[in-house]
Image: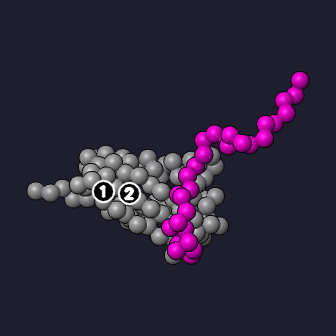
Amino acid sequence: MKSATPDYAGLIRFLVQPFLETPDALRVDCEVLANGSRIWIRMAFEGTDKGRVFGRGGRNVQAIRSAIEGVAASVGQTVSLDIYGSGQNRDNDEDRPPRTTRSSPRPDAPKRPTKN
């Protein structure tokens, strides 16, 4: 008997929509890869909601990723979440690389002067 695949799109909507001013703009696409063991989730929303979805220091988006990774692990799957630009420009965003959180400064960022 084949095990049921969790409703990842529904879970993402449940977790993300409370952060959005325009929840109707949320777009979620799930793709099953490699005989069902790997799930790729793509999410897009209005650019004005980015700060609320990501949260201070990326805490909100990290919690969302942890939740879906936990669900996936419980059924023997692995999951990847990619976040794209605004939902209303969805056609243009498909050519762009996914937006991700950055944990360290850009290598080309100017150095801050130190106080002596």
Residue in front for this viewpoint, 76 or 22? 76
- Whether residue 12 appears in this view of the structure is yes
Where is 78 relative to 88, above or below? above
Residue 115 shown in magenta: yes
Q: How far apart, in angstroms, are the residues tagged by discs 2 and 1? A: 7 Å
The residue at which mark 1 appears reads as 33
The residue located at (26%, 59%) in the rendering is: 5
**Dominant secondary structure (helix, strand or loop) of the stretch shown in magenta:** loop
Residue 105 occupies quadrant:
top right
The residue located at (51%, 48%) in the rendering is: 62
Q: Sequence-wise, which precedes: disc 2 or disc 1?
A: 1
Disc 1 is placed on an element classified as strand
The residue at which mark 2 appears reads as 40
- Tell me the crowding category of disc 1: few under 14, some 14 to 19, or many 20 or more residues within 10 angstroms, Cα based: few
The residue located at (47%, 70%) in the rendering is: 27
Colour mode? Answer: one colour
Q: Position of residue 65 (x, y in %)?
A: 45, 50
Q: Which mark is residue 72?
A: none
Residue 88 shown in magenta: yes
Where is 35 relative to 114, above or below? below
Residue farthest along the right direction in this orientation: 116
For badge 2, the amino acid type reads Trp
In this picture, residue 116 sits left or right of residue 3: right
Residue farthest along the left direction in this orientation: 1
Q: Position of residue 30 (x, y in %)?
A: 37, 63
| Residues shaded magenta | 87-116
- Whether residue 23 appears in this view of the structure is no
For badge 1, the amino acid type reads Leu
Question: Split into 4 quadrants, where in the image is the N terminus?
Answer: bottom left
- Tell me the crowding category of disc 2: few under 14, some 14 to 19, or many 20 or more residues within 10 angstroms, Cα based: some
Question: Split into 4 quadrants, where in the image is the C terminus?
Answer: top right
